[in-house]
Image (cartoon, rainbow, N blue to C red):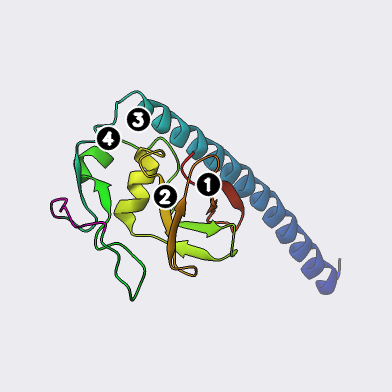
C-alpha cells in the first residue's frame, strides 16, 4: 500500500469512527430530551396535587397588595401594580410549563412579562382573567375564549394563555 493509500485509509477510518460516535451522541441526546420531558411532566403532575392558596398574594416585585393597584398609568396603559402569588406558593411547583411571552391574536405582536407573573401563570393558569398587550396598550381577556396564545421558546404557537 502506498503512502497515499495508507493516508486515505486512515482518513476513511477516522470518518467512520466519527460517524459512529455522532450516532451514539445523538441517541444519548434524544434519551436525555425524552427523560427531561418525563421529569417535567411528573413535576407538573405532583404540583397539581398541591392546592393553590390564592390568598398567598403580593404585588409583582414584592410588597403588599394595595387598594389602588388597578389604577391605570395613562402613559403606559398598565396598572400601578399586578398581583402575583408569593414566592413560597410558586415554589410548590408549576402545573404548566414556564412561559414568559405571549402573542395577542388581535394585533399579532408579542408581549413579555416579569418572572413572578410568568411563574404565577405556571403555578395557577387560571389565576388571571386578563393580561396586557404592550402594542395595543390595554388589558384583554385570557382563557379558552381569550385573545392570547403562548409564544413558545422555539417560536411555535402554544395554547391559549390562561388554560
SS assignment at label 4: loop
Q: Are marks 3 and 1 in contact (CB under 8 Å)?
A: no
Per the model, the C-alpha gap separating discs 2 and 1 is 8 Å
Depth order, front residue of 160/32: 160
Q: Quadrant of residue 70?
A: bottom left
SS assignment at label 2: strand
Label 1 crowding class (10 Å Cα cut-off): few <14, some 14-19, many 20+? some
Per the model, the C-alpha gap separating discs 3 and 1 is 25 Å
Q: Position of residue 91 (x, y in %)?
A: 26, 40
Q: Position of residue 37 (x, y in %)?
A: 51, 38
Dot 2 or dot 1: first in sequence order is 2
Which residues make up the magenta segment?
63-70
Residue identifier under label 1: 146
Per the model, the C-alpha gap separating discs 4 and 2 is 24 Å
The numbered mark at residue 130 is 2
Residue identifier under label 4: 92
Name of the residue lying farthest toward the left: 64
Compared with 107, 100 (above or below) is: above
Amino acid at each position: 500500500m502506498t503512502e497515499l493509500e495508507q493516508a486515505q485509509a486512515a482518513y476513511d477510518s477516522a470518518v467512520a469512527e466519527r460517524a459512529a460516535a455522532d450516532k451514539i451522541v445523538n441517541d444519548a441526546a434524544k434519551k436525555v430530551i425524552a427523560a427531561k420531558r418525563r421529569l417535567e411532566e411528573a413535576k407538573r403532575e405532583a404540583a397539581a396535587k398541591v392546592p393553590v392558596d390564592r390568598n398567598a398574594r403580593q404585588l409583582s416585585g414584592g410588597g403588599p397588595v394595595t387598594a389602588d393597584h388597578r389604577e391605570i398609568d395613562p402613559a403606559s396603559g398598565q396598572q400601578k401594580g399586578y398581583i402575583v402569588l408569593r414566592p413560597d406558593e410558586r415554589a410548590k411547583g408549576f402545573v404548566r410549563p414556564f412561559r414568559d411571552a405571549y402573542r395577542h391574536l388581535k394585533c399579532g405582536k408579542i408581549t413579555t412579562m416579569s418572572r413572578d407573573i410568568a411563574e404565577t401563570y405556571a403555578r395557577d393558569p387560571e389565576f388571571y382573567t386578563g393580561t396586557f398587550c404592550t402594542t395595543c396598550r390595554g388589558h384583554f381577556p385570557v382563557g379558552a375564549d381569550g385573545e392570547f396564545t403562548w409564544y413558545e421558546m422555539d417560536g411555535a404557537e402554544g395554547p391559549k394563555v390562561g388554560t
